[in-house]
Image: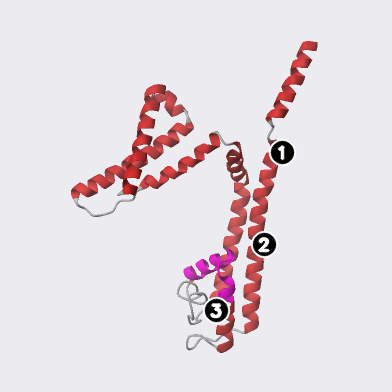
Amino acid sequence: FILDTIDTTLASIFVFEAVVKITALGPLAYWANAWNRFDLFLVLCSMTSALAFTLDFFLGAGTSPLNLGFLRTVRVLRLAQRSRSFRKLLLTLRLGLPSLLNITLLLAIFIYWFAMLGMILLGGALPSNECGVSRHANFDAVFISLLALYRFATGDAWACFYLDAQEAATFGRYAPGVLPPSIGLVHVYFLIFMLVSLMMITVFMAILLQYYDIQQQLIVSSAEVRQYAGRAAKAARRA
């Protein structure tokens, strides 16, 4: 009840703000500003969700429509108007997006290739515990293999799975008819995967830092602007 009240209150505030702005500025002037269009989109999403919940309640459909109110959290991007540091971060992401997409695509291909290789080497290992081979992390299907490798690439419990895979290979803890891999191949598989994935993630961060540094060099500080204005004024007086 409390969360619903807060959600309704915030939605009402945003609707009131949009109405006041449209009334004060006029529809054309309001629409000319990109941030105003952004706010209006969020307001319409909130009103659409409220209308859907109202119809669902009175019609008794019981369908639980999607609440688009969570999109209001995107309003934090408006901090870019007032916060210079936040604006730098957004501009860094925008400038580095092509390079980030390239390294992300390369990482996705790398994970997919290792998922296929993992299904060949580690597929069929029997679960032991939630930390190692389990229903949440195994190489018995493509989708779960991709999820497991993505989890390992972030450093989440990869060592535990690695040790459990060694144990499964050593003691033959595999489904009947599945030939366990050699312990050496398990070592090579995990060490190469973690090394390359960490290198790619490091490159990802290096790209962000590079573009942030480039942006820092391009930004003119207020002191430099005042200094240039003073020199220009002196040159104008001399002329």
Foreground: 28 or 132? 132
Q: How is the image coloured?
A: secondary structure
User: Which segment is the magenta one?
Assistant: 143-162
Q: Tag 2: Cα neighbours inside 10 Å, few (<14), some, or many (≥20)?
A: few
Name the residue tied to disc 1: 217
Position above or below: 37 against 59: above
Q: Distance of mark 2 from mark 3, alpha carbons?
A: 24 Å
Residue 239 shows up from this direction: no
Regarding residue 111, the answer to whether it shows in the image is yes
Q: Nearer the viewer, residue 164 or 37?
A: 164
Label 3, secondary structure: give it. helix
Q: Between disc 2 and disc 3, whose residue precedes?
A: 3
- Disc 1 element: helix
Which is nearer the eye, 225 or 188?
225
Label 2 residue SS: helix
What's the amino acid at mark 1? Gln
Question: Are the residues at dot 1 and dot 3 in contact (C-beta closer than 8 Å)?
Answer: no
Mark sitting on residue 199: 2
Residue at (74%, 16%) from the top-left corner?
233
Q: Nearer the viewer, mark 1 or mark 3?
A: 1
- Magenta segment's dominant SS is helix
Image x and y of residue 113, in percent: 58, 68
| Magenta highlight on residue 226 | no
- Residue 150 lies in the magenta-colored region: yes
Residue under the image location 77 percent in, 11 percent down:
237
Q: Which residue is mark 3?
A: 122
Asked if the residue under mark 2 is in contact with the one under mark 1, i.e. CB atoms within 8 Å, the reply is no
